[in-house]
Image: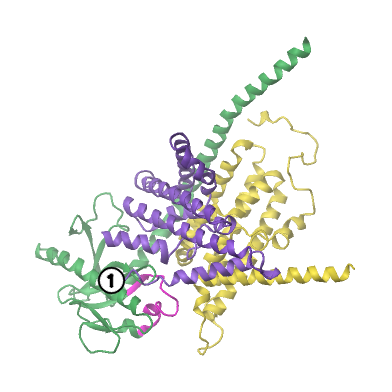
Chain colours: A purple, B green, C yellow
Amino acid sequence: MISNLAWIFFSTLLINNFTLAMFLGLCPFFGVTRSVDTGWRLGAANTFVLVITSISAWALNTYVLVSAPYLRTIAFIVVIASMVQIVEMVIKKTLPTLFRELGIYLPLITTNCAILGLALFQTTRKYTLLEGIVFAIGAGLGLTLALSLMASIRERMDVADVPALARRMGLVMIIASCLSMAFMGFAGMGSG
Amino acid sequence: MSGHEHSHGAPEAAVVDAGSSSVRLIATLAMFGALAGGILAFTYQKTLPPIRKFAGERVEVAVREVLGSPAKLDTLFLVGDKLSKTPPPGADPLEAVKVFIGFDASGAPIGVAVEEKAPGFSSDVVLMVGFNPQTSALTGFKVLAQTETPGLGDKIIKDSSFARQFPGKLVTPLKGDKSATSDPSTVQTITGATITSKAVIKVINKAVETWKPRLDAYAKEGGK
Amino acid sequence: MTAIHVDAAPDATEPIVPGAPPPQPLWLDFWRGIAEDNPVMIQMLGLCPSMAVSNSLENGIGMSAAVIFVLVCSSLLVSLLRKVIPGEVRLASYILIIATFVTISDLVMQAYFPALSKTLGPFVPLIVVNCIILGRAEAFAGKVKPVRAVADAFGMGVGFTLALCTIAAFREVVGNGTLLNHPLFGPNYEPWNFMIMPPGGFLTMGLMFLVMGWWGERQKSKRAEVTP
């Protein structure tokens, strides 16, 4: 049981990192990774939304979609978007400080492919509620890790003398490739 | 005066308009939702038979392969912790946890096939494992899903000399070794893919470990 | 219901919609998506599928077909319904329309191309959140006549296909020594497996952007030579 949960967590966090190995959530990865601070805040907000998504997807799969699996994609999108909205309102009321830190990212995240991807992967792998939550936390921390690593590299890159032809996306992609390669080194840690 | 009346009237009209349009918003969305649901329900009904047919065939092909083309196949479902000829109430027979029993032309059992998985090099390795529950001897395995390293780990599929070692090996439990061996319960792992080879061995051991007691109990209770 | 429309101008010309794209020949609507506004190479949208499923040309073609189907159908429907959908709920309606077509293509793929559907897995339903499709519905299809919307959607779809299939073909040839599963180089070729693994996706994309950057710089310096 514990070893199963640990395997789900570490394989999602490192080996099958959402951003670096599954190409999910690339928009924030390339779009907003300008500073480390933004990077980890966005990561934290993402983790939060992923956990909510995982719970909603589990509830939908168990109670609602059993008789109508063809509505899965639509149901996921609608329910996740409204859940995030509700949670956003609750946080705004009860934890204003946290809201100021993460709030602006919440609506953006809803349309992120990592969120829908998590719900879909969780469904095909038939995770239980607990496994799903562990999967979501692993995925969220994995995104945070990738975002902050990328952000700290790009902070250095801003002061480096980069050839003009690589100044836009070229170099960023190749850095992402190196990061992805480094994360491949974690493969094999699950078997002992 | 009349100008005043006019400017008073305009905002009121806007308010009325906003009120009716919020009804319109909900009506439009509800209409779209119902329409989408209807179209999808229709498509689903049309595509369900081929989807289910394929899912069933995929499993059956794997079962036949690991059991060496049996003449007849029986299916037992796991209900609670016991095996039963009928699936658990309300469960989809395609999705339920089950074991396949293969018989040869004379009606003698060849072995059983079960699906099992374990962590490999990068994610779960899922196998169909065929073995004889009386002797714990393997009849074979087939990889159902894996995402191992191309060129190294995927040799468990592409390198037929690896898979060829398994039939006849005794799972007491099964072990892996880097060098060639004639030991009845040891197989040679693939060079450069030791972890993936060991994952295959782990899945096989897990399959026999979990399913042999269940099958023994079922046989003891008089099921054949 | 439609009676609420105030600006039901009786003239034959397209009523002026705020932010509507300027009128231009139909072939330009189509061509823009392939070249100057290529969704992947220029707008950098839909990067996620262009790297995730580009490890073989077969996957690339399957994905492109699904994207073109969803893009054209949803653009057509969005354009046809542009006067019925109230502005406040247009995004929700667009997403509903897109999700419906995505589910249809997913179900059809599962039923008739099961092997392909299994390798693409969740990346087919993930077309819903592909920014290209919602982007075209919002920026173009919701504001123009159906003919233009379809031309534009088709152009964008073909542009996406070209980018995705180029990347996929390159990765498959280099990383596996095959093209559409036909061996190209004989048994002595040692495939560069790295290229069909995730880092190879980023690297191929990066190389493509470098080549484009080099091309852009060259054009710029050529122009600089001519002007003085």
Above or below residue A57? Residue B215 is: below
Q: Residue at x 42, y 59 (%)?
A: B51
Q: Residue furthest top?
A: B1
- Residue C153: x and y in percent read 66, 55
Quarter of the image that includes the C terminus of chain C:
bottom right
Q: Residue at x 35, y 83 (%)?
A: B190
Which range of residues does the magenta coloring cover? B142-160
- Residue B113: x and y in percent read 26, 70
| Label 1 packing within 10 angstroms: few (<14), some (14-19), many (20+) | many
Q: Nearer the viewer, residue C183 or A178?
A: A178
Q: Nearer the viewer, residue B33 or C130?
A: C130
**Residue A192, quarter of picture:** bottom left
Q: Residue furthest right?
A: C228
**Residue B58, quarter of picture:** bottom left
Residue A112 magenta-highlighted: no
Above or below residue C7? Residue B192 is: below
Q: Amino acid at mark 1?
A: Val
Q: Is residue C21 left or right of residue A103?
A: right
Mark 1 = which residue? B203
Q: Is residue A84 left or right of residue B129?
A: right
Above or below residue B103? Residue A97 is: above
Is residue B69 among what the camera can see? no
Residue B158 magenta-highlighted: yes
Q: How many marks?
A: 1
Q: Is residue B138 left or right of residue A115?
A: left
Quarter of the image that includes the N terminus of chain C:
top right
- Residue A62: x and y in percent read 34, 47
Subunit ID for the residue under disc 1: B
Q: Residue at x 56, y 57 (%)?
A: A33
